[in-house]
């Protein structure tokens, strides 16, 4: 690890916003690596995901937080605790406001971030959704509060979005003698965590609307062997009638999920993967503290 770099900055930058504000898409675009799963369904991100960007004069550790929610029951309580903890541990906070977000949400999010007393920047995402001269519903609020912001469209122009964000974030990072992590790393996620997330992403992609929110994934076995990595994985559902839907007719849905996930895992690992999937029912797991803890849905206090 490099040390004592001159005029060097390093720190944690939290990406915070509503579900579907584009946090995960932005993180992947910033790193030009897929470290955070993406879905058009809300609440895809359940645990913080880190992505490490190494520049000549800085190391930025981006932290993709779960979407902010009002509900604090069951797993939503954990999701909200994750958001609070991510903000508390950040050096800089990025408030991501989707162009279609309400003024009420903008006020709530910015109010929360202001209370943290952390340096922060406002970023309007999905700017391509604003046709012609349209402005977001919260635009007047930003003007009245004299809040500077940048508008980006990650999907339309990823490089421009990257440059806009870096120009605002870099000056706010603390000075450092050197990087916080090895400069060869682009994430702190383990291979087991990455594999589980890709399985969950595939499930979100192919299952009906109501099922993903009651679905979790855990790795039962992960063997890094040559030439094939062997992974045994369990998909938990919280209702008995969801099990058959996840499996599908003659196992068709489970095969589709497995095929989608395996390709993503192989891309990251760079070698062949044998992925074995099973489905189990744990009724009410989203409100069961013991199971939530077993699945890692607990904020670690340091």
Image (cartoon, helix red, strand yellow):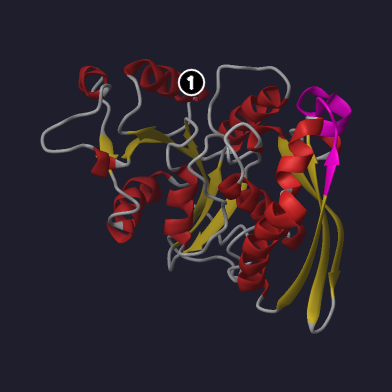
Residue 61 in view in this figure: yes
Q: Position of residue 290 (x, y in %)?
A: 88, 29
Quarter occupied by residue 96: top left
The answer to whether residue 52 is left or right of residue 46 is left
The answer to whether residue 22 is left or right of residue 132 is right
Q: Position of residue 228 (x, y in %)?
A: 79, 79
Could you say which is closer to the camera, residue 230 or residue 137? Answer: 230
Q: Looking at the image, is 246 positioned above or below residue 232? A: above
Q: Looking at the image, is 146 positioned above or below residue 190? A: above
The answer to whether residue 107 is left or right of residue 131 is right
Q: Position of residue 214 (x, y in %)?
A: 71, 33
Quarter of the image where the N terminus is located: bottom right
Q: What residue is at 61 percent from the left and 37 percent from the top?
A: 89
Could you say which is closer to the camera, residue 49 or residue 273? Answer: 273
Q: Secondary structure at mark 1?
A: helix
Q: What residue is at 31 percent from the left and 61 percent from the top?
A: 159
Instruction: Count the numbered circles shown.
Output: 1
Quarter occupied by residue 124: top left
Is residue 136 in the magenta section?
no
Residue that badge 1 annotates: 112
In the image, the segment drawn in magenta is 279-292
Quarter occupied by residue 301: top right
Q: What residue is at 76 percent from the left and 27 percent from the top?
A: 286
Q: What residue is at 57 percent from the left and 35 percent from the top?
A: 209
Q: Looking at the image, is 169 positioned above or below residue 56? A: above
Q: Position of residue 263 (x, y in %)?
A: 63, 68
Outermost residue, bottom side: 227
Is residue 289 in the magenta section?
yes
């Amino acid at each position: 690890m490099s040390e004592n770099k001159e005029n060097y900055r390093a720190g944690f930058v939290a990406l915070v916003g509503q579900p579907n504000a584009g946090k995960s898409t932005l993180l992947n675009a910033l790193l030009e690596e897929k470290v955070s799963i993406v879905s058009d369904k809300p609440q895809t991100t359940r645990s913080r995901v880190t992505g490490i960007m190494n520049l000549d004069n800085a190391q930025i550790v981006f932290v993709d937080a779960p979407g902010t929610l009002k509900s604090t029951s069951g797993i939503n309580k954990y999701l909200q605790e994750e958001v609070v903890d991510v903000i508390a541990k950040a050096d800089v906070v990025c408030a991501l406001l989707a162009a279609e977000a309400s003024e009420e949400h903008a006020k709530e999010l910015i109010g929360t971030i202001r209370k943290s007393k952390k340096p922060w920047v406002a970023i309007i995402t999905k700017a391509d959704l604003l046709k012609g001269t349209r402005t977001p519903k919260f635009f007047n609020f930003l003007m009245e509060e004299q809040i500077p912001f940048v508008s980006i469209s990650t999907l339309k122009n990823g490089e421009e979005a990257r440059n806009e964000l870096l120009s605002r974030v870099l000056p706010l990072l603390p000075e450092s003698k050197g990087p916080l992590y090895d400069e060869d790393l682009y994430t702190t996620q383990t291979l087991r965590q990455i594999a589980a997330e890709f399985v969950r992403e595939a499930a979100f992609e192919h299952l009906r609307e109501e099922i993903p929110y009651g679905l979790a994934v855990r790795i039962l076995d992960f063997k890094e062997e040559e030439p094939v990595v062997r992974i045994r994985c369990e998909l938990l559902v919280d209702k008995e009638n969801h099990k058959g839907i996840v499996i599908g007719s003659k196992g068709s849905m489970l095969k589709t999920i497995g095929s989608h996930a395996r390709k993503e895992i192989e891309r990251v690992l760079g070698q062949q993967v044998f992925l074995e999937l099973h489905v189990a029912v744990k009724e009410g797991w989203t409100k069961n503290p013991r199971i939530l803890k077993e699945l890692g849905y607990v904020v670690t206090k340091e």
